[in-house]
Image (cartoon, coloured by chain):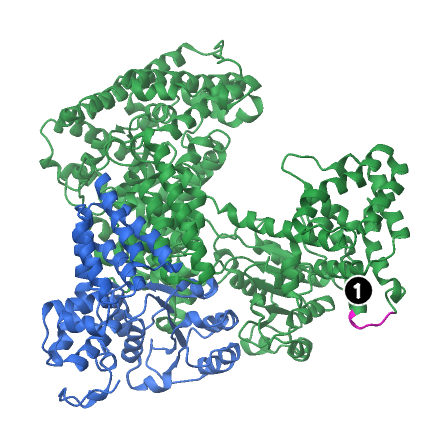
Chain colours: A blue, B green
């Protein structure tokens, strides 16, 4: 997405998407999973890191972390000593046997304790055969080459590979962490923002920093100011605040008020699937009695199922409200 | 949890084993005493004086039994008194219900017991009563908790003091000859052989009752009611504990974890090494009795907390009353410690002379030093012990240099050590260092024997017999190749390379990173093998050119894809006429790709080493690398990697980087990094303790560890959970859980059928979070693998059988598959089998007629039997004489012409038997059905069948007699084998 000229930034890289522009280059800048990152940063200075697998949901900084590690470890010789392959590269069994093995066998002059690094991004998309072929290579050339794998689901990495690596799990970023970074970026970009606007972005991001930055950028480009209203115009979702209010009404056994909100959302033309998915999400985080919450989630789940089946009428959603009220009354 | 049950349940039969375990965990005693350990019972420390032999074994046996049975009813009555409501429930558990045969409770007559013994029993009872009384006070008046717990701590001590054996002489002589000691020992030894049936039964009954009690026990009374004191990190180091019974504010596991956290060790068996017995309500009477006898201080839960506070120098805040018992206790302990230390130092000298594995030695030494120096000091001055300990540990290496010269020198030799990964750095360099491969029956020894005898066995002069696959002591002399199989990270490759090195062979290695296609194997390998190695010249050690090669085919399961096509066949061919030994390695020997290979290989299966074995290794690595990680942490890591040594080392390497930072936080987060298996997930889902720190989001994340398997696991195991809270609500909770699970299943259906993945979070709630919330409690049994998977594959197979039957009878039936199964199959089978069963040989024509009418194959008869079988029902074919069956087969082959499908069926069968790796898809579908029917004669025909297949593929009719009769001849091979039997 090209940057529009009216946003004036003194940076040369103004035409980059923000996610690239603000990609951390140092360990310090990486947000979240501080402990794991800190441990890696120790390796970055000392060298001799074990083979690692970083697993975690998208947008939490897996690739960034590995690149940071490689850059700090290898400095100027990054170009020669790093082989980076991701899902866009061909990574079949022959690539592993030829390209990676060749790379592992190459001699690159590096300081003591430093090793060549093979970065395999999105390693869970590698075929099993390719992973099998990787096994012994990882071991035999461990005196010269280390591997860093990133993946979303570690289960898709075969066990022998996992056995050869130290596993690091990255967790979703907390809302506060995302928010802090967003504020920082907004200041860099000299944006006008309101607090609820950023909060709305945080909500839509769901702990995914990349998503958050993308949303921030598209809101800024589309509307200029970061307000809750604008954010939800861009990331069109039923407003969580409204839904939260609605659930609170249900918990108070007040179906009339709850229905008013639902009717309003319906009139705005949101699809029932969006509505129900967001109700589910909101309900998970809402602050009501734990047992009641579980009852609510149960009812929401049933309705969700019906809607997925194709019965996506207003009646179903209304029935959900009624059921929630009954559950609240019983409670 | 499981462990707890085990100790209760297997206590009697598994005694020697537990003693051994104990031994493995704590290698801190001198070898001399170790000998005694192995043969003794769970009172493993009790060393018998020589007089023991004089005593009659029977006497001893009965007396021990007596002790148990006497203390048990006592415990029961105490329980009654103390809380009627619960005990009523428990009393209903009639032991006879558990063991059908028994009619009445037999009170064992005690003709040979001595007066001393009775006295002791009384004593034990008294102490038991006292302990329980305290508990009851606690329970009836929880408001007065403070008072009661202060009272509770002195009382056991008093009880101990009043006991007939004063602590002093015993500890000094250390091998005190108390009457009980004498009796106990032979009892344990001979219990299996000498006990009369009645006694054995009685004992079984007692333990059954105890187990039942254990199962019905209440969960902790007021969870979280007491604050767990925050002690200094290593305040319990060097102390050992056994936790028994139900504690007031914690689950037992929790208590154990608290102890471990503070550096203490938790044992499962009461022995002399034990320092404290932590007792809760309904404690095991045996443990109490033994502890009493060994003068082990008995602590209540509060006592434990006080101990933590005291050891970490926080005693002041507690109470003024406490001082007196504490001091007593302290002085007592001091005495004992002193005695012990003197003894220890003796031991130590012995130790230093004896050579041991260095890793273990470090541990031991560390422990010892800690104990020696801290405990007396601590008692006297109540100083914080930490600096002293660390100082000592650091000094230790210099004083004990002789024990581990090897790592040192190794480090010096290889200067490049800085750049090496830990896994490589600490790789075993000789066979003895391989973890878990020490014994005579270990795979290393087997492989070594096999390899060293290879050239003798295969010099072409003799033809060894193919061994029976079930033979125990097979040395694999028949096979030209060995297959090492086992999970990753347990040392298969290491074993192979080391064994090869040890025997002075040259290894040619091919692994998954090499292309291993048919052509390549043929060309390169065969030329390679005729080469001679010059490596001897260069390393300067070997005089002559080595001629002994070994081909190591690593990761044979990694032969995949187009490039490796035909590699497996070629490998097998290579093995068949190989002139050198071949070692293959794979992870899963049941993989369809591997299965054909298995037939030609000496099968060596590697098991995961036990946690203790790995722990020793890891701790020694930690020591060498000067990384400080608590033993509990190490255990956690090993368990999380599922006993994978390599990954454990990797994790340790990663953890080590955090040394300089804030240690506490660093280590805590690390647990999150580790992967969770489904077993662990399901345990977390239901365990109440885990729930305390988890948000709803965390709980639903559990589901995502493996969202395809997790719901099955939850469904399989939710009934094993005993939920917290009122017992009468259990059924309602189970109902609610079942409801949630059924909804989860509905959701699952939609996800899979319509790929509505947006429902996945919903399923997480239905299939995992809601059940976990409803049934939140603790597990009472083992966590099982979901039975659904097995049942599902079985039903699939049955459906396939029915389909086959349907196809074959198609010409003369008009029914659907379902109705063939329901309406035809039972009667058809009956029609065939009845004449055989009734008339024997004369019934054969009638049976054959029935088969002909329905165009059935001989194999279809077996298929029918399987299809119509029900659990508990006998197969009708069992009633038929074997000769009659053979006659039927013979006449079938003679009379019945081959059907269009019979040839196909026959060939298919053979292919799958030989396990041709090229028709995998077909194979995997086919394997179950054919294997059962042809299991018995599989091994006999294998080679023959193989030959047939080859002939077939090349379409040369020379080998198979008569191309037209191929089908019948192929089916004939089977009956032949059968007839031989």
Residue B147 place in picture, x, y as percent: 13, 24
Q: Is residue B234 left or right of residue B412?
A: left
Quadrant of the image containing the N terminus of chain B: top left
Pointer 1 chain? B
Above or below, B233 against B14 in this view is: below
B358 displayed left or right of B577: left
Question: Where does label 1 land, which residue?
Answer: B947
**Position in image of residue A32 (x %, y %):** 22, 66
Task: Tell me the quarter of the picture where residue B376 sits.
Answer: top left
Picture residue at 81% right of the left edge, 36% below the top: B834
Percent position (x, y) of residue B13?
51, 30
- The magenta region covers B953-957
Q: Is residue B679 magenta?
A: no
Residue B667, image x, y percentages: 26, 56
| Quarter that holds the C terminus of chain B | top right
Q: Nearer the viewer, residue B833 or B521?
A: B833
Tell me if residue A16 comes above or below residue A243 in the rendering: below
Please, is residue A23 above or below residue B867 in the view?
below
Residue B143 placement: quadrant: top left
Q: Is residue A331 visible?
A: no
The answer to whether residue A138 of the structure is visible from this angle is yes
Q: Residues within 10 Å of mark 1 (few under 14, many from 20)?
A: few
Look at the numbered disc 1 and give the secondary structure of its residue: helix
Vertical placement of residue A127 versus B846, above or below: below
């Amino acid at each position: 997405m090209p940057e529009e000229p009216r946003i004036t930034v003194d940076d040369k890289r103004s035409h980059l998407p923000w996610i690239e522009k603000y990609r951390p280059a140092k360990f310090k800048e990486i947000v979240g999973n501080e402990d794991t990152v800190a441990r890696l940063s120790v390796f970055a200075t000392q060298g001799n890191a074990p083979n690692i697998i970083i697993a975690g949901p998208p947008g939490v900084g897996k690739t960034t972390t590995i690149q940071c590690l490689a850059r700090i470890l290898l400095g100027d010789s990054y170009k020669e000593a790093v082989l980076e392959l991701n899902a866009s590269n061909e990574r079949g069994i022959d690539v592993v046997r030829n390209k990676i093995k060749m790379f592992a066998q190459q001699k690159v002059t590096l300081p003591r304790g430093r090793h060549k690094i093979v970065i395999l991004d999105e390693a869970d998309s590698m075929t099993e055969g390719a992973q099998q072929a990787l096994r012994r290579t990882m071991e035999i050339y461990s005196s010269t080459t280390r591997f860093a794998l990133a993946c979303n689901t570690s289960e898709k990495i075969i066990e022998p590979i996992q056995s050869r690596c130290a596993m690091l799990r990255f967790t979703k970023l907390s809302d506060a962490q995302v928010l802090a970074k967003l504020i920082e970026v907004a200041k860099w970009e000299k944006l006008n923002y309101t607090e609820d606007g950023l909060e709305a972005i945080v909500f839509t991001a769901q702990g995914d920093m990349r998503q958050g930055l993308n949303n921030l950028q598209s809101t800024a480009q589309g509307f200029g100011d970061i307000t809750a209203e604008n954010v939800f115009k861009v990331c069109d979702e039923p407003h969580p605040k409204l839904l939260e209010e609605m659930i609170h009404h249900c918990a108070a056994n007040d179906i009339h008020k709850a229905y008013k909100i639902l009717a309003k959302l319906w009139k705005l033309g949101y699809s029932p699937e969006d509505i129900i998915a967001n109700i589910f999400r909101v309900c998970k985080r809402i602050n009501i009695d734990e047992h009641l919450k579980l009852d609510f989630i149960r009812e929401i789940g049933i309705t969700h199922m019906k809607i997925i089946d194709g019965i996506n009428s207003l009646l179903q959603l209304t029935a959900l409200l009624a059921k929630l009220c009954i559950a609240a009354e019983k409670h | 949890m499981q462990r707890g049950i085990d100790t209760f349940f297997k206590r009697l039969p598994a005694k020697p084993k537990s003693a051994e375990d104990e031994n493995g965990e704590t290698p801190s005693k001198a070898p001399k005493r170790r000998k005694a350990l192995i043969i003794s019972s769970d009172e493993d420390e009790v060393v018998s004086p020589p007089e023991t032999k004089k005593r009659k074994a029977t006497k001893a046996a009965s007396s021990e039994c007596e002790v148990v049975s006497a203390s048990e009813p006592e415990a029961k009555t105490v329980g009654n008194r103390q809380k009627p409501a619960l005990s009523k429930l428990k009393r209903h558990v009639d032991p006879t219900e558990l063991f059908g045969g028994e009619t009445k409770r037999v009170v064992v007559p005690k003709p040979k017991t001595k007066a001393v013994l009775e006295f002791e029993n009384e004593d034990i009872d008294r102490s038991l009563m006292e302990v329980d009384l305290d508990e009851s006070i606690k329970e009836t008046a929880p408001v007065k908790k403070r008072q009661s717990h202060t009272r509770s701590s002195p009382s056991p001590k008093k009880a101990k003091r009043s006991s007939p054996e004063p602590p002093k002489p015993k500890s000094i002589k250390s091998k005190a000859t108390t009457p009980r000691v004498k009796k106990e020992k032979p009892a344990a030894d001979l219990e299996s052989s000498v006990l009369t049936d009645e006694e054995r039964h009685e004992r079984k009954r007692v333990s059954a009752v105890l187990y039942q009690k254990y199962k019905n026990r209440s969960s902790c009374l007021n969870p979280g009611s007491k604050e767990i004191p925050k002690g200094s990190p290593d305040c319990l180091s060097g102390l050992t504990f056994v936790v028994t019974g139900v504690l007031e504010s914690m689950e037992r596991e929790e208590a154990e974890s608290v102890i471990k956290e503070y550096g203490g060790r938790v044992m499962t068996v009461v022995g002399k090494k034990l320092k404290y017995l932590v007792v809760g309500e309904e404690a095991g009477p045996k443990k109490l009795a033994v502890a009493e006898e060994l003068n082990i201080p008995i602590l209540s839960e509060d006592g434990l907390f006080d101990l933590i506070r005291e050891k970490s120098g926080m005693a002041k805040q507690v109470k003024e009353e406490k001082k007196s018992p504490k001091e007593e206790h302290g002085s007592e302990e001091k005495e004992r410690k002193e005695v012990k230390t003197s003894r220890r130092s003796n031991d130590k000298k012995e130790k230093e002379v004896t050579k041991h594995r260095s890793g273990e030695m470090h541990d031991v030494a560390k422990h010892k030093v800690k104990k020696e120096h801290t405990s007396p000091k601590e008692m006297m001055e109540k100083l914080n012990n930490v600096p002293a300990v660390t100082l000592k540990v650091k000094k230790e290496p210099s004083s004990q240099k002789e024990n581990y010269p090897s790592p040192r020198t190794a480090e010096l030799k290889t200067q490049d050590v800085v750049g090496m990964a830990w896994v490589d750095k600490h790789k075993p360099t000789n066979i003895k260092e391989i973890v878990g491969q020490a014994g005579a029956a270990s795979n290393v020894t087997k492989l070594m024997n096999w390899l060293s005898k290879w050239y003798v066995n295969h010099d072409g002069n003799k033809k060894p017999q193919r061994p029976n696959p079930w033979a125990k002591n097979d040395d694999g002399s028949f096979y030209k190749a060995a297959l090492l199989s086992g999970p990753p990270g347990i040392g298969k490759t290491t074993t192979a390379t080391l064994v090869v090195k040890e025997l002075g062979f040259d290894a040619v290695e091919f692994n998954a990173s090499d292309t291993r296609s048919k052509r390549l194997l043929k060309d390169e390998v065969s030329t390679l093998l005729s080469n001679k190695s010059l490596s001897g010249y260069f390393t300067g050690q070997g005089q002559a050119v080595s001629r002994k090669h070994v081909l190591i085919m690593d990761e044979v399961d990694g032969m995949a894809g187009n490039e490796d096509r035909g590699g497996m066949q070629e490998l097998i061919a290579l093995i068949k006429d190989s002139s050198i030994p071949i070692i293959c390695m794979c992870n899963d020997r049941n993989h369809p790709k591997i299965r054909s290979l298995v037939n030609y290989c000496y099968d060596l299966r590697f098991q995961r080493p036990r946690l203790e074995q790995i722990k020793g290794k890891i701790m020694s690595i930690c020591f060498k690398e000067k990384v400080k990680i608590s033993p509990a942490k190490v255990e956690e890591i090993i368990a999380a990697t599922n006993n994978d040594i390599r990954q454990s080392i990797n994790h340790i390497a990663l953890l080590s980087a955090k040394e300089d930072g804030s240690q506490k936080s660093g280590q805590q987060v690390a647990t999150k990094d580790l992967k969770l298996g489904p077993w662990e997930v399901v345990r977390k889902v239901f365990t109440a303790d885990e729930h305390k720190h988890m948000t709803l989001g965390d709980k639903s994340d559990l589901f995502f560890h493996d969202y395809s398997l997790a719901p099955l696991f939850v469904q399989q195991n939710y009934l094993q959970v005993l939920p917290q809270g009122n017992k009468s609500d259990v059924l309602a909770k189970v109902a609610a859980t079942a409801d949630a699970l059924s909804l989860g299943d509905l959701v699952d259906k939609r996800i899979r059928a319509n790929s509505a993945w947006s429902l996945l979070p919903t399923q997480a709630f239905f299939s995992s979070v809601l059940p976990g919330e409803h049934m939140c409690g603790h597990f009472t049994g083992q966590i099982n693998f979901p039975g659904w998977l097995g049942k599902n594959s079985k039903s699939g197979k049955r459906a396939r059988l029915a389909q086959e039957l349907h196809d074959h009878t198609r010409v003369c039936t008009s029914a659907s598959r379902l109705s063939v199964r329901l309406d035809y199959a039972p009667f058809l089978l009956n029609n065939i089998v009845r004449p055989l069963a009734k008339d024997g040989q004369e019934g054969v024509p009638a049976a054959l007629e029935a088969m002909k009418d329905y165009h059935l194959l001989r194999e279809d008869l077996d298929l029918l039997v399987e299809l119509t079988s029900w659990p508990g029902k006998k197969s009708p074919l069992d009633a038929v004489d074997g000769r009659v069956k053979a006659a039927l087969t013979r006449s079938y082959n003679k009379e019945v012409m081959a059907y269009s499908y019979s040839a196909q069926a026959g060939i298919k069968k053979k292919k799958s038997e030989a396990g041709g790796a090229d028709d995998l898809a077909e194979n995997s579908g086919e394997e179950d059905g054919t294997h059962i029917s042809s299991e018995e004669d599989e091994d006999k025909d294998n080679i023959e069948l193989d030959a047939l297949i080859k002939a077939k593929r090349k379409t040369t009719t020379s080998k198979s007699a008569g191309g037209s009769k191929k089908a019948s001849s192929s089916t004939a091979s089977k009956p032949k084998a059968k007839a031989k039997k």
